Amino acid sequence: MSTEQSAVFEVLRTGPLALLQDGGRAGHAHLGVTASGAADRGSFVAANRLVGNQVGAAALETVFGGLDLRVLRTALVAVTGAPAIVTVTRPACDPFGLPAHPVAPLAGTGPSTGAVLAAGAVLAAEAGRTAVFTHPTDRSFVVFAGDTLHLGPPERGLRNYVAVRGGFAAAPTLGSRSTDVLSGLGPPPLAAGALFATARDTAAAHAPGSWPSADFVRPATRIPPAAETMRLSLLRGPRDDRFGEAGWRALLDAAWTTGSASNRIGVRLESSIAVAPLFAATGELPSEGMVAGAVQVPPNGQPVVFLRDHPVTGGYPVIGVLTEASIDRAAQLRPGDPVRFVDRTE
């Protein structure tokens, strides 16, 4: 959070849930703290790449869009993740879309660029119009003081990432600015009225890298059309022997549906599949260490796919573990989405 003088954005509306996330706080499992971090790592990395940030710079993670930000200072931003439309409303614009207020050159641009923008500001003030610009995801663009940025609901998928050049500033907890919804570590969820500066404005160690060479990247995480089934690749887990070959085949052959009780901790899957074929062995297991992507099967036979805020330990057997790319895809599942598991070794 920051003061009005140093802030780049003011939060006007958050949508269902908006969190600050970075690369996570790995290395603290012995303290009972999971790594957390961005749920869809591929989309998170792509957003920072588009604005030339260092790896792991903090970004905003949204659920179902609905985020509104008031821009207080000129900034380079990017939005990635689920396909959605970003709308920028700019007051008093000239026909070329230049802002109707004095602006300073963006970091990484020459003084001539700033001069052109300042000249355009005079024309824009005289025009006295309001312009609306739309941007698809997986692109970067410049916003100016006075703009309002609105992230609409995704047409498919669940989560988006908003990055700003310099990264969002927040006090780290155990070396990370990520919000862990299970443990409560990290910054609180975004709320209307919150002000954010960039990390480069508060600590030289977080200065961004070189100016990005592209303003577009291919979608980092493939989210299938609504009529298509999300396929999650996995390897056999440490307790697959407790299910037998019949249980493994049942997991792969079943048509699963994403349950409504899913969040950053895990995705609950549902099916009419019988519970009995999943178990070839009985008996309680002691609690064991858990990792992101673990597919745990409780007694009801309905799998739970652990995401980034998973518990450190669990007592139900893990039949399989997702690949890294499939963890990202699982983070984009919305309630009701169809899911199939695919054996990575086949």
Image (cartoon, rainbow, N blue to C red):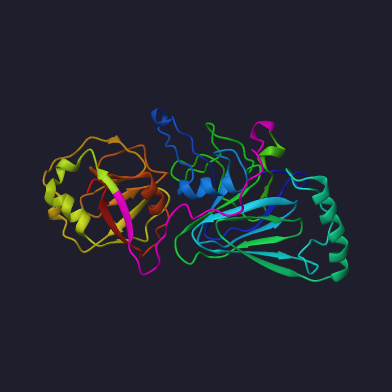
Residue 209 horizontal/vertical position (percent) = 64, 38
Depth order, front residue of 286/8: 8
Residue 212 horizontal/vertical position (percent) = 63, 45
Q: Residue at coordinates 50% horizontally, 62% vertically from top-left?
A: 83
In the shown orientation, is residue 40 left or right of residue 336? right
In the shown orientation, is residue 59 left or right of residue 197? left
Residue 245 horizontal/vertical position (percent) = 13, 48
Residue 223 included in the magenta stretch of the image = yes
In the shown orientation, is residue 314 left or right of residue 102? left
Residue 156 included in the magenta stretch of the image = no
Depth order, front residue of 112/224: 112
Does 31 sit above or below residue 185? Answer: above
Extent of the magenta region: 204-233
Q: Quadrant of residue 87?
A: bottom right
How many numbered marks appear? 0
Chief SS of the magenta region: loop
Extreme-top residue of the structure: 30
Q: Residue at coordinates 82% horizontally, 46% vertically from top-left?
A: 111
